[in-house]
Amino acid sequence: MTSRTLQGKSAIVTGGASGIGGAITRLFVARGARVVVVDLQEEAGQAIEKELGDAVVFLPGDVSDRTVADTAVATAVDRFGSLDVLVNNASVSRQKPFEEQTDDDWNLAMDTGLYATRNFMLAALPELKKTGNASIVNFGSGAGLNGQPNQASYAAAKEAIRGLSRVAANEWATFNIRVNVVCPMALTAGVAAWADARPEQYAQSAASVPLGRFGDPDRDVAPIVGFLASDDAQYMTGQTVMADGGSVKLR
Ligand SMILES: NC(=O)c1ccc[n+]([C@@H]2O[C@H](COP(=O)([O-])OP(=O)(O)OC[C@H]3O[C@@H](n4cnc5c(N)ncnc54)[C@H](O)[C@@H]3O)[C@@H](O)[C@H]2O)c1
């Protein structure tokens, strides 16, 4: 039987229509939560809303638009009565050498990564305070921790999110709002396309993971986010959790 560790909780999942975000939305609903899914992809958003019924409200929108954050919070309160959990999962970037990254490339990584995360956290704060027991899960990346080549703007945005999360964990502990970061490694559609195009590189990367494979969004990553969102993690805040098969070991 699926554990109902998120029973009665109301959540926002950005980028919650597909990829890791889609896996999080499905797991949250299976564990008893209701979810506002914010996503650019209308078709995927409508599909997951249809699949999961009344437990999901799809809000089409770009996370880099500040008004979308306000609307998402208002929608959660209007439809579900409160907001207990915020997952800042969506983010996009372009991969190229540092010296070739343009202002536009940097703005994309920062606007959809750091600023979207900040805006959603600030928009959610008044409602999260009211619950007296809330959880925020933000997304970092091994690319930031390792300084992965071709990822300058993305790595900078992701490490800034980790810094912001630690400050918010300290400042908002007084409201019992926990703030943690997950750094995933998962075989999403984008990674699968790369694996098809460069099978040797993919095999090499997978072999370098201690657990010997890329993670599965549903089975390997979403349960870790579900744990952090639940009361089982009530004594954890300010942490970065690696959902990466043991690739990075933080101390
Ligand atoms: N997949 C991995 O191995 C990996 C590794 C490290 C970090 N991450 C991080 O995990 C998170 C999820 O990754 P993923 O691989 O599932 O990504 P993805 O690109 O497969 O999916 C992201 C989802 O967000 C949506 N989205 C993208 N830009 C948006 C925007 N501006 N506004 C609203 N929605 C938007 C997309 O439509 C999609 O549904 C990201 O923060 C990513 O940086 C992923």
Image (tube, rainbow, N blue to C red):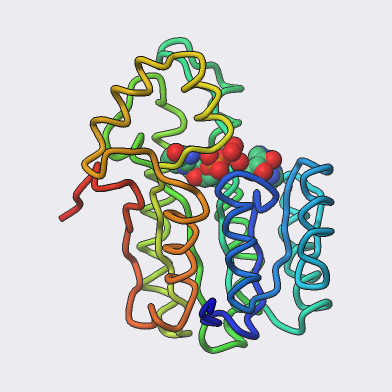
Which quadrant of the figure has residue 74? bottom right
Question: Residue 58, image x and y in percent?
Answer: 80, 58
In the rendered image, the residue lying farthest to the front is: 1
Residue at coordinates 60% horizontally, 46% vertically from top-left?
A: 90
> Taking 40 as reference, is 33 above or below it?
below
Residue at coordinates 64% horizontally, 61% vertically from top-left?
A: 25
Question: Residue 23, image x and y in percent?
Answer: 58, 54
> Taking 77 as reference, is 59 above or below it?
above
In the rendered image, the residue lying farthest to the top is: 100
- Name the foreground residue: 54 vs 147: 54
**Relative to 166, is 51 on the left or the right?**
right
Residue at coordinates 38% horizontally, 52% vertically from top-left?
A: 162
Number of marks in the rendered image: 0
Q: State which quarter of the image contains the C terminus.
A: bottom left
> Taking 18 as reference, is 199 above or below it?
above
> Taking 236 as reference, is 166 above or below it?
above
Residue at coordinates 73% horizontally, 64% vertically from top-left?
A: 36
Which image quarter has ligand 1?
Answer: top right
Question: Residue 232, image x and y in percent?
Answer: 40, 81
Question: Residue 11, image x and y in percent?
Answer: 64, 71
**Relative to 5, is 124 on the left or the right?**
right
**Relative to 17, is 201 on the left or the right?**
left
